[in-house]
Each structure stands twice: as C-alpha cells, then as structure tokens.
Amino acid sequence: MKKIRNISTNIIANIGLQITTILCGLIIPRLIITTYGSEINGMITSITQFLGYITLLEAGMGSVVKAALYKPLANRDSTAVSGIVQATNNFFRRIAYIFVIYLIVLAIFYQNIAHTNFDFMFSFSLVLILGISTFIQYYFGITYQILLQADQKIWLTSGLQILTLVINTIFTFVLIKLHCSIHLVKITTAFIFAIRPIVYSIYVKKYKLNNKTKKDNYSISQIWDGLGHHLAYFIHTNTDIALLTIFCGVKEVSVYSVFFMVVNGVKSLVNSVATAIEPFFGELLVASDKKKVEKAFNLYESLNILLIAIVFTSTAVLIQPFVSVYTSGISDANYCRPIFGILITAAEAAYSLRNPYSSIIFASGHFKQTRNGAFIEAIINIVISLVLVKPLGIIGVAIGTFISMLLRSFQYIWYLKNNILYRRVLVSVKKMVIMSLAIVLSVVLSMHIDFAVFNYFQWILLAIMRFGIISLTTFVIYGLAYRRQLKYIIILIKERR
C-alpha cells in the first residue's frame, strides 16, 4: 500500500511538473517572438541545443548511477551510497571544467555557424549567458538530483523544478514587459535556476554521506555501456535543430521549436510515468520478485499504450490549429506546417512507446547488452535526416526521427523477450495493433468536428470535442480487449484512497 502511494505521489508530482513546464513553455517563447522576433527565438533554441552537445560527455551516467544506487539504497548501505555519490560528483565536475572550454569556443564561432543578422558581441555574450545554468547544474547539483530520483524522492525534485519554473516565468514576463534586453532576461533565468542545486545539497545531508569514503568506481563501471543509450537520446533531441541551423537558418529553427515545444510537453507528460516507475522496478528486481515485476510490467505497458493512443492522437489533430492561434500576428516566418505537425507528433509517440521496455531494461542494469541498438538508432536518425533535410526541410528531419524511434522501440521489445521477462513478442504486438485501430477510428470520427479557429476559446472548444471523441473511442476499444487490467486499475485507485 505504501509503495503504491509512493509511486502515485511521484507520478502526480511528475505530471504536475510537466503541466507547469508546458504552461511556462507556452508563455515565454510567445513573449520572446512577439517582442524580439523569430530570429532571436531561433537563436536561443539553437544555442541551447549546441550547448546540449556537452551532455555527450555524460555517457549515460545518470541511468547507470541510478541502477547502481538501487541496491545500496534498498539495503540502507550508507558507505556504498557515499562511494558512488563521491565518484559521480568527481565525474560531473570534470565535465563542468570541460564545458567551460567548450562554451568559450562555441561563443567565438557561433556567429559563423548560424549566419545571423546580429553582430559578434551580441551572439558571443548570449552564448555565455545561456551556458551559466548548464555549468551550475554539472558542478553543483546533478549528482544529488540523481540520488534523490534513485531513492524515489521524485516528488522533491519535481516540486523544486515547478517552483523555479514559476518564479522564472514571472520574472521573465516582467522583464520583457519592461523592455529589458534578452541578455538581462536570460541571466536572471540562470540565477533563478541556481536555487535547485542549493536546495539539493541541503536536503541530501539527511543521507549522512561521507566524503572521505573510498570512491566506488566499480558500481558505475557500465558508464561506457550507457554511452550508446545516451548518444541515441542526445541525437534524438539535438540532430534536427543542428541540421536546420546549418542548412535552413534560425527562422526555421524557430518554427521547429514552436511545434516541438507542444509535442515535447505532451511527451513529457506521458514519460513522467516512466520516470516515477523505473525506481520501483529497480527495487522489485533487487528483491528478485519476478512475478510482481511481470504483473506490474503488463499493467504499465497497457497504460502506456493507452496514453499514447489518446494523448498523441489528440495532439496530431489539434497541434496546427493551436500553433496558428499561438503565432497569430507573427509574419516573419511561416508557422502553418500541418504535415510537419503530424510527423513530429508521430515521432515522439514512437519514442514514448519504449517507456515500459527501457524502464525495466535500465532498472536491470542491461546497458552493455542493449548499447548496439542505441548506436544503430543514432546512425539511422543522422543518415535519413541528412539525406532529407535539403529537399524536404523540417519535414525531412521529422521523417528521420520517426523511423529511428520506431525501429528502436521494437528492438527493445525483442530484447525484453529474449533476456529479461521472456514474454512473447505477440503480447506487445497485439496491444499495438489494437492501439493502431483505436487511433485510425478515433481520427476518422474526431475529424468530423471541424470549424474555423481564430482564438484560444474556439481552440479549447475544438480540443474538448475532439479529445472527448478520441478518448471515448479508445477506452471502448481497450475496454473490450483488456477488461481485467482496467478492473485492476480501478482497484488500485480505490486502495490508494
């Protein structure tokens, strides 16, 4: 009962974080575009992505460290926890030093990469300012955040992120309305986000970590095996914008960022369940309770597919009307891209499809065994996107992302069948076939609701009607196919009360 409450609390906190991220993410880019223009918005998105390249040096460390912490945390072995934390802290601080060098190099050469209409000092200083938050994260807070997540304290990390996001949005709104420079706006953001590592460092004192404990490098020896997974994720989140910056310009990056902002928010809502559940799987696997693992996994898989069918289908049929309203009055770039909206939504749905499989694989510590699939995913994404970006622009990079995501999700299913749960692939395929039928039928029915949308009220009305039809259609189909699992979900909700 306590574990169910803990999981549900973490899920609620994570969902709250994603909703806050979506709302704040909608407010700030709109303010930037209308006040400073699409080119500035595109620059900020582009610079942020280029700064993200430093995460390659993490080599998947976050997932590896969490997997290493599950057992000592479950056994309350403070010595082992201290050793892992100390080794991790040293690792991330080395990355922070390397990041400073990379940041300066990027600041010097960004003007030549992006070909913007702003002078060198403008772009140079903006890159440095945007890099402050990343340095603070690596040097002071990321290790403690990983520790708290591994110990199922996601409610704390999510709550703190919600608080800083709200504070940042308020300050950003005020500063922009006062016509402050974009540089002042972003440096204020950097200092607000510095609150997080300070709070983490204070809270983890309760773990009574011993900094003099011998570093436990063995427990995180799979770092290089985690590199493949991290590389695939890195390419998933960075390739598109990098290629668009080089081949299409920062205005196209701005268009991409607006659509991706919506879809990424939706994906984060769905993936928040995975983030909250993975430590639970880790605890079950440490206890070697295979029956409970399989029962929990089957339920989670069905819930994930159900969420994808409802949430991403609704997003696909509503994203272009929303973007049209969101960018109304903005004429310096073309934001009417309905085909791109559908493709990028499909790509992120394919990515979210893997959540149950990756959660249990990472909780099991199977990084080395699955790294080759991650490298293949990354290669497919880069090659297809490179080939198609010139003739098709943002549609081309979306196609590359979709194909690589889908193939990788099926590779996870196959690995799980042969190495961890030994369940038939047809079990998962059947659920996906039902999901596909639900998506097709719900789209056909929902598209009968169609009227002109010129403001948020009209869009909300359209969203309620289409979402209602999609949800009802999907629940009916799933209710017929998986009555027992839906009944079990209802029982869990009653138990939590």
Image (cartoon, grey):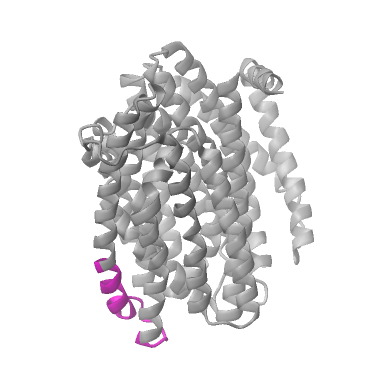
Judged by its main secondary structure, the magenta piece is: helix
Q: Can residue 197 be seen in this view?
A: yes
Residue beneath the point at 39% across and 60% down: 136
Q: Is residue 60 visible?
A: no
Report the number of discs.
0
Q: Nearer the viewer, residue 11 or 85?
A: 85
Q: In which quarter of the image is residue 6?
A: top right
Query: Where residue 84 sits: x, y (%)?
Result: 29, 36
Magenta region includes residue 436: no
Residue beneath the point at 41% across and 13% down: 290
Q: Would residue 339 appear left or right of 418 to someone viewing this image? A: right
Q: Would residue 296 appear left or right of 496 to someone viewing this image? A: left
Q: Would residue 270 appear left or right of 225 to someone viewing this image? A: right
Q: In which quarter of the image is the C terminus?
A: top right
> What are the residue bounds of the magenta stretch?
101-120
Residue beneath the point at 65% across and 17% down: 483
Q: Quadrant of the N terminus?
A: top right
Query: Where residue 476 sits: x, y (%)?
Result: 70, 27
Q: Is residue 8 above or below residue 175?
A: above
Query: Where residue 454 sits: x, y (%)?
Result: 75, 67
Residue beneath the point at 52% across and 29% down: 433
Q: Quadrant of residue 285?
A: top left
Q: Nearer the viewer, residue 486 or 440?
A: 486
Query: Where residue 257 sits: x, y (%)?
Result: 50, 64
Q: Would residue 275 appear left or right of 462 to someone viewing this image? A: left
Q: Which of 299 and 167 is in front in this view?
A: 167
Residue positioned most to the bottom: 119
